[in-house]
C-alpha cells in the first residue's frame, strides 16, 4: 500500500482521469480527492471543510514532512532535542512565553467548528505517517490537534520578539545557560546564534505587494501581485496549494507549514497578501525585585505584586545522548522575564495578540468571504498582530491597510525603550480598532503598493495616502521608511495603463535597479569635482564609472555592470537588509563614493579574475534538501552541484525581482547563492472566472527524489510563471495524478 501510494503521489500516473483510493471508503465515510497538476501542486477537494483540511494535512506531510516536523518541533519548545545547543535559544523563547501550555489549554476554547478543522488537518498528517512507514520522523511520531495553535503562535513569536526593545544580550553561551540551577536571574534569553550573513538574511524578511484597479488594466478588472520575501530554508517557508470543499471553501494560494488552508492568495471573488510592517506591538518593562525576604515580589504602584516562577527540564542533544538542563522561568503581569540588567532589575516582555483565539475565526472568515464588506469585517478583528495587507476583488475594489494588534499607550513615555514596570501608567490600555489604523480604499491613482514602507507612501498622490499627523506617534516604528522597492513600484505602477495579465507578470520580474538609475546621473557633477581635486583617483575609477554609465540599469545574466554595481552598493551601504543607510565613512562626502567604487572593482577582480564579470555566473540558484537554518544551507551550497543563473538582485538597490544571497567566499566559493526572495509569487486578475499565475523558487516538493523538487526553479530563473489552475474543470483537465483518501 505504501509503495503504491508513493507512486501515485509523485505524479507518475499521467492519465488525468485516473483515480486510485488509498483505502476502500467505508459506509458513511468521507472521501477526499487530491489531484496534482503538472507542477506537482496539490488541489484538494472534500465534501466538508474538515475533509479538505484532512487532505491539506496529508499533502503537506507528503511534500514536506521534514520541514513540517521541523517547524512543529520548534513550536513545542523541543528543538534542542534534535539540533543540540543551536536549538536552546528557540526553546527558551518558546517556554518563556508558555506556548505549549497555553496552546494545549486554549484548543478547547476554540469554536467547535475550528477544533474540527484543526483535528482533521492533524489526522491527515497522522494518516500520512501511518501509510508511509519509510518516512522516519526525527522526533514526532504522532501529532496532536493543539499543535496547530502552537505552530501559529511560535512562528509569530519568532517574528515579533525582536521588536520588544530589550537591547543586546550580554555575552552568555549555552554552558552558562546549562549552569542555571534554579536561579531565574542567572540567565538571559539569548539572540539566536547565527552567522553574520544568516542574521542579515533573516532581517531581509519582507515583501512586495500591489493591487491595481480596473482603470489601469486592459480588462477593466482589478489585479493583485503577491510577492512575499521569506527564507527558502527553515521555519517560515511557504507551501502552495488549492483547497476546496462543497461547503463553500475554494481558496488557492500559500501558507506556512502548520496551516490547514492557504492564508494568502485568492478565492473566486477576492484575494489579498501581506507585507512585513513595523507596528509597535511588543514592549519591554523594567521590573525591580528588591525584597530579599520575598524574592518573587516586584515593585508596582507604590507596593508590590507577586511574580510566578516555575522550572522546566530542557533536553539537549549531545551526539547520540540527551543532556537534561533545568531552567527556571519567571513572569509578571507584564509578561515573562527575558533579561537581567543588574542584581535586582530585570526586563519583562509582552507581545500583543500572540494568544488571540480570534485569529482562527478571522482567517477562516477571510478565506470564505465573498465581497469586500465580509472580508473587511473579518480582518477588522485585528487578530493578526502585524503585517500590511493589500487586497483586490471582482467588484473592482483595491485596498491597503496597516494592520496590527496595536496597544493603546500613554504617549508621555518613550516606547522605543524599556519603560518603568512599577508605574501603572505604563500598562497597556486596550487596543486600537481596525478603523483607527492607516488605510486606503480605491485611490484615484488606481493602485496601492506596499513594499515594507510606511503607510504614508502607499500611492503616488500624497493627498490620498494616510496622513502621519492623524495617527499616534507610538502606533508604528516605520514612519520614515520609504524603501527603494516602494519608489520603484510607484514609478512602474504610475506609468501602467491598459495592463494585461501577461504584462503584470513582466512587471513582477522587473530588474530595473532604482539606486543606479537615480544616482549615476547625479554622480556626473561629483566626478567632475573629483577630477579637479584628486585626478589620480579619478583616472583610476574612470573605466569603472564609464562602464556603469553605459548601462540601462537593469540586472541581467550577461550584465557585468550588475556585478560591479552590487559590489559597489554593498561597500557603500553594507550587505543584506535593510542596508539603505550609508556607512559612516561614506556619508559626509560623496566624493568618497569613488573610493568605494575602486574598492568594489578590486573585490570583483580578486573574486573572478576580472572586474567585468557576468552577473549570471556570479549569482546562482541551487537547492539543498532538509535544512533547518539558512546558515546550514549556506555551508552546503557549492559550485559543484547543479545550479541555475538568476537575474534578481538585493532589494535595497530598489529592484522588484528581489533576491538575497549568501556572501562570496574567495577561492572556496566566489559565487553568491540565493536564499531569500519570492518564496511564493502570484499574479491574479479578478475576471469571472478569476485568472491566476504562480511560481515557487524551487518546486512543490521538499523531497530531493521528487521530480518537483527543483522543476519550478527553471521557471523562476527564466522569469516565468505557471498557470494556477482554479476552476474544477481546469483542475480536472490538468491533473497528472489523482488519489482518493478515505477519512
Image (cartoon, helix red, strand yellow):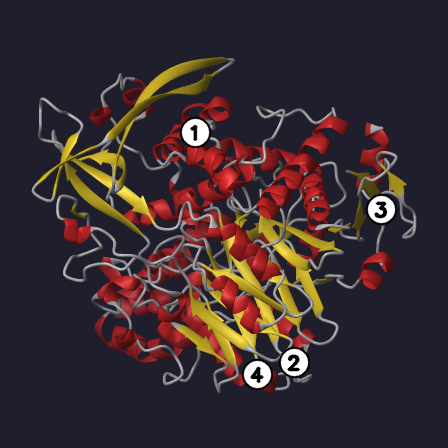
Q: Residue 419: percent from the left, percent from the top? A: 17, 49
Q: Tell me the residue that label 2 is attached to.
A: 221
Question: Do the numbered discs 4 and 3 sit on residues whose CB atoms are within 8 Å?
Answer: no
Query: On the image, numbered disc 1 is attached to which residue?
Result: 87
Q: How crowded is mark 1: few (under 14 residues within 10 Å), some or many (20 or more)?
A: many
Residue 693, x across and y down, in percent: 69, 65
In primary-sequence order, the first of circles 2 and 1 is 1
Q: Which of marks 4 and 1 is in front?
A: 1
Q: Residue at horizontal 58%, vertical 68%?
A: 225
The residue closer to the viewer here, 352 or 455, is 352
Foreground: disc 1 or disc 3: 3
Q: Nearer the viewer, mark 4 or mark 3?
A: 3
Q: Distance between the residues labelled 2 and 1?
A: 48 Å
The residue pinned by badge 4 equals 496
Q: Is mark 2 on a helix, strand or loop?
A: loop
Q: Do the residues labelled 4 and 1 touch (CB within 8 Å)?
A: no
Q: Quadrant of the N terminus?
A: top right
Which residue has dot 3 on it?
Answer: 738
Q: Point out the tag, 1 or 3, that comes first from the N-terminus.
A: 1
Q: Is residue 322 left or right of 621 when viewed as pictured? A: left
Relative image position of residue 64 (x, y in whole percent):
65, 39
Amino acid at each position: 500500500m505504501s509503495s503504491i501510494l508513493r507512486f501515485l503521489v509523485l505524479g507518475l500516473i499521467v492519465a488525468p482521469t485516473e483515480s486510485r483510493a488509498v483505502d476502500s471508503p467505508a459506509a458513511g465515510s468521507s472521501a477526499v480527492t487530491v489531484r496534482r497538476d503538472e507542477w506537482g501542486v496539490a488541489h484538494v477537494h472534500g465534501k466538508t471543510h474538515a475533509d479538505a483540511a484532512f487532505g491539506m494535512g496529508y499533502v503537506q506531510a507528503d511534500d514536506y514532512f521534514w520541514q513540517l516536523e521541523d517547524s512543529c518541533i520548534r513550536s513545542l519548545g523541543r528543538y534542542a532535542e534534535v539540533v543540540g545547543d543551536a536549538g536552546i535559544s528557540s526553546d527558551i523563547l518558546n517556554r518563556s512565553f508558555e506556548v505549549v501550555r497555553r496552546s494545549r489549554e486554549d484548543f478547547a476554547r476554540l469554536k467547535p467548528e475550528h477544533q474540527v478543522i484543526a483535528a482533521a488537518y492533524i489526522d491527515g498528517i497522522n494518516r500520512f505517517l501511518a501509510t508511509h512507514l519509510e518516512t522516519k520522523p526525527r522526533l514526532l511520531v504522532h501529532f496532536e490537534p493543539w499543535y496547530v495553535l502552537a505552530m501559529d503562535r511560535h512562528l509569530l513569536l519568532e517574528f515579533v520578539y525582536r521588536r520588544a526593545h530589550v537591547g543586546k544580550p550580554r555575552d552568555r553561551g549555552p554552558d552558562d545557560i546549562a549552569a542555571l540551577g534554579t536561579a531565574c536571574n542567572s540567565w538571559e534569553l539569548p539572540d539566536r546564534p547565527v552567522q553574520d550573513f544568516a542574521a542579515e538574511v533573516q532581517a531581509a524578511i519582507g515583501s512586495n505587494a500591489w493591487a491595481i484597479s480596473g482603470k489601469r488594466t486592459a480588462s477593466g478588472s482589478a489585479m493583485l501581485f503577491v510577492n512575499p520575501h521569506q527564507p527558502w530554508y527553515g521555519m517560515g517557508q511557504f507551501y502552495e496549494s488549492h483547497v476546496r470543499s462543497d461547503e463553500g471553501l475554494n481558496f488557492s494560494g500559500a501558507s506556512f507549514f502548520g496551516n490547514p488552508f492557504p492564508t494568502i492568495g485568492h478565492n473566486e471573488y477576492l484575494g489579498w497578501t501581506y507585507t512585513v510592517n513595523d507596528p509597535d506591538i511588543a514592549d519591554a518593562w523594567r521590573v525591580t525585585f528588591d525584597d530579599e525576604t520575598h524574592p518573587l515580589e516586584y515593585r508596582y504602584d507604590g507596593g508590590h505584586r507577586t511574580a510566578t516562577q516555575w522550572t522546566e527540564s530542557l533536553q539537549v542533544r549531545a551526539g547520540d545522548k540527551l543532556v537534561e538542563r533545568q531552567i527556571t522561568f519567571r513572569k509578571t503581569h507584564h509578561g515573562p522575564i527575558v533579561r537581567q540588567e543588574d542584581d535586582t532589575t530585570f526586563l519583562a516582555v509582552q507581545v500583543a495578540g500572540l494568544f488571540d483565539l480570534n485569529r482562527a475565526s478571522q482567517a477562516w472568515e477571510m478565506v470564505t468571504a465573498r465581497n469586500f464588506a465580509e472580508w473587511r469585517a473579518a480582518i477588522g478583528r485585528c487578530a493578526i498582530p502585524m503585517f500590511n495587507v493589500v487586497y483586490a476583488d471582482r467588484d473592482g475594489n483595491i485596498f491597503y491597510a496597516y494592520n496590527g494588534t496595536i496597544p493603546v499607550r500613554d504617549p508621555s513615555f518613550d516606547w522605543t525603550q524599556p519603560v518603568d514596570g512599577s508605574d501603572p501608567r505604563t500598562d497597556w490600555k486596550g487596543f486600537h480598532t481596525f478603523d483607527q489604523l492607516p488605510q486606503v480604499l480605491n485611490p484615484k491613482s488606481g493602485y496601492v503598493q506596499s513594499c515594507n514602507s510606511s503607510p504614508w507612501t502607499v500611492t503616488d498622490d500624497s493627498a490620498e495616502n494616510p496622513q502621519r499627523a492623524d495617527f499616534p506617534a507610538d502606533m508604528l516604528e516605520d514612519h520614515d521608511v520609504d524603501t527603494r522597492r516602494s519608489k520603484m513600484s510607484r514609478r512602474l505602477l504610475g506609468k501602467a495603463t491598459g495592463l494585461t495579465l501577461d504584462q503584470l507578470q513582466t512587471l513582477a520580474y522587473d530588474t530595473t535597479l532604482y539606486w543606479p538609475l537615480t544616482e549615476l546621473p547625479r554622480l556626473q557633477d561629483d566626478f567632475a569635482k573629483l577630477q579637479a581635486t584628486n585626478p589620480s583617483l579619478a583616472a583610476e575609477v574612470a573605466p569603472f564609472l564609464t562602464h556603469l554609465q553605459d548601462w540601462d540599469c537593469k540586472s541581467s545574466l550577461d550584465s557585468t555592470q550588475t556585478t560591479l554595481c552590487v559590489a559597489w552598493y554593498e561597500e557603500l551601504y553594507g550587505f543584506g537588509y535593510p542596508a539603505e543607510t550609508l556607512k559612516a565613512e561614506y556619508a559626509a562626502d560623496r566624493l568618497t563614493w569613488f573610493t568605494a567604487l575602486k574598492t568594489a572593482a578590486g573585490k570583483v577582480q580578486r573574486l573572478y579574475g576580472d572586474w567585468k564579470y557576468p552577473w549570471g555566473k556570479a549569482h546562482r540558484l541551487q537547492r539543498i534538501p532538509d535544512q533547518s537554518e539558512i546558515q546550514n544551507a549556506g555551508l552546503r551550497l557549492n559550485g559543484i552541484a547543479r545550479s541555475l543563473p538568476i537575474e534578481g538582485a538585493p532589494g535595497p538597490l530598489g529592484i522588484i525581482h528581489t533576491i538575497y544571497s549568501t556572501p562570496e567566499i574567495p577561492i572556496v566559493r566566489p559565487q553568491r547563492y540565493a536564499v531569500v526572495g519570492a518564496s511564493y509569487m502570484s499574479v491574479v486578475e479578478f475576471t469571472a472566472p478569476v485568472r491566476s499565475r504562480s511560481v515557487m523558487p524551487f518546486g512543490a516538493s521538499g523531497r530531493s527524489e521528487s521530480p518537483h523538487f527543483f522543476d519550478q526553479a527553471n521557471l523562476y530563473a527564466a522569469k516565468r510563471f505557471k498557470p494556477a489552475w482554479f476552476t474544477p474543470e481546469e483542475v480536472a483537465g490538468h491533473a497528472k495524478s489523482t488519489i482518493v483518501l478515505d477519512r
